[in-house]
Image: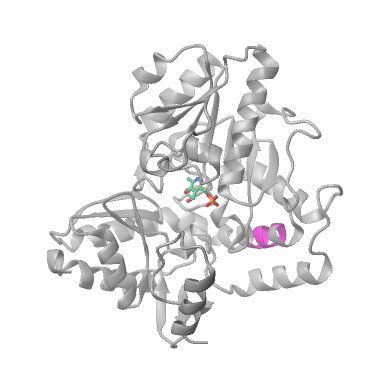
Amino acid sequence: MNFKDIKQIYDAHIIPSYARQEVCFVRGEGVRLWDTEGNEYLDFGSGFGVNSVGHAHPEWVSAVNRQAAMLAHTSNLYYTGPAGFLAERLCQISGLRQVFFANSGAEANEGLIKLARKYSADKYNDPKRHKIVTLRQSFHGRTHTTLAATGQDAFHAHFQPLTGGFVHAPAEDIDLLRALGSDICAVLLEPVQGEGGIIPLSAGYLQNVSALCKERDWLLMCDEVQAGIARTGPWFSFQESGILPDALSFAKGIAGGLPLGGFIAGEKALDTLTPGLHATTFGGNPICCAAALATLDILEAEQPTVAERGEYVREKLLSMNLPAIREVRGRGLMLGISVKVDPKAAQKKMLQQGLACLTAGADAVRLLPPLVISKTDLDKGLDIIQNVLRKGGSL
Ligand code: PLP
């Protein structure tokens, strides 16, 4: 297989909904990837934060192989061990109580939306009390309803009319939230906004939102799809601000490379979704859950140093004193380098020099390296970033 052949097949047979980089990867090990031509890359994107334990981690591989050989799938008509053990573990690390397993971040958020509507309907029996507040610059997924929840107009074009029932509020403006009326039932937010540009919400704002939600009995729901599972340092990004949401969604890094997402409900919303009200064929799949249990085991050792390694990267980037760098945003190993050059052009140049990374929002080169990355490999990636960004406008 060479790059040209595979590209030709894609051009002929794959719906062109992605702007892909000109590379086809064939193998990964640790924080490294290799392409069809044998070139080596450092992976600072982790497939959008999914490969949290790097590629082909031996413990992860054997957990997946063991489960695949034992039992791949049975459906939610029955009980299986891995889903149960994983749910228990997720409740321990989140402080919440009951898990629903889905297959992706968007699906996880769809579940949260249903949870909020059902909670409100059960308790208030007022059809008007159904609106969910989300924030500008947020991103909650690409299904039709999570698109409507997403607070970025650019994603809404072409797909009107959108699902109703969402109010988009500017972040950090608690007075505006206070002014909202009796038709609200919940707030859904990312404590660290990802796709919107890597924008952490302040602890003060999150605490105020949490207090307001308690006062009005609005469900506070955190979208931890990108920032959760130790990506920003703590197991979940809300934990940095000292709040406890009523529910959260997770996906991406949880299963280290296999598709798994879900949501966790806390005390307030226990037993809100009863038999027949929510379901998915693949959710809680034993292989994905076994992969997630192995991922969490591996991350136990990594999580305590994520925040410190993130600070190390931030300080090194700032100490480069490059005119092309405006600021470095984010927490832990979820970082956005706000650049004064075209971030997509920078991303392309970095790939040509052997560093795979991402962009976010209008101005940021985004770094989501595997959480197992060493400082030595962080340094190697930072050298490439410096090399590319030092060229400034002549990229
Ligand atoms: N929520 C957040 C915060 C995300 O970053 C994403 C994806 O980038 C999603 C939801 C959607 O996740 P998925 O692509 O798995 O549906």
Q: Is residue 24 left or right of residue 315?
A: right
Of residues 83 and 234, the one drawn nearer to the viewer in this rendering: 83
Chosen colour scheme: one colour
Q: Quadrant of residue 344?
A: bottom left
Q: Look at 69% across and 59% down and name the residue there.
A: 288
- Residue 341 lies, in percent from the top left, at 19, 59
Residue stretch rendered in magenta on the structure? 289-294
Q: Is residue 30 visible?
A: no
Q: Is residue 302 above or below residue 378?
A: above
- Residue 17 lies, in percent from the top left, at 46, 59
Q: Look at 52% across and 27% down and name the residue there.
A: 164
Please count the marks in the image.
0
Q: Look at 40% across and 15% down and name the residue there.
A: 178
The verdict on residue 285 being magenta is no
Q: Is residue 155 above or below residue 385?
A: above
In the current view of this chain or complex, which residue is farthest to the front? 12
In the current view of this chain or complex, which residue is farthest to the right? 78
Of residues 143 and 81, the one drawn nearer to the viewer in this rendering: 143
- Residue 296 lies, in percent from the top left, at 62, 57
Q: Is residue 187 visible?
A: yes
**Most prominent secondary structure in the magenta stretch?**
helix
| Screen quadrant of the C terminus | bottom left
Q: Is residue 267 left or right of residue 148?
A: right
- Residue 223 lies, in percent from the top left, at 51, 40
Q: Is residue 185 above or below residue 111?
A: above
Q: Is residue 82 left or right of residue 318?
A: right
Of residues 313 and 388, the one drawn nearer to the viewer in this rendering: 388
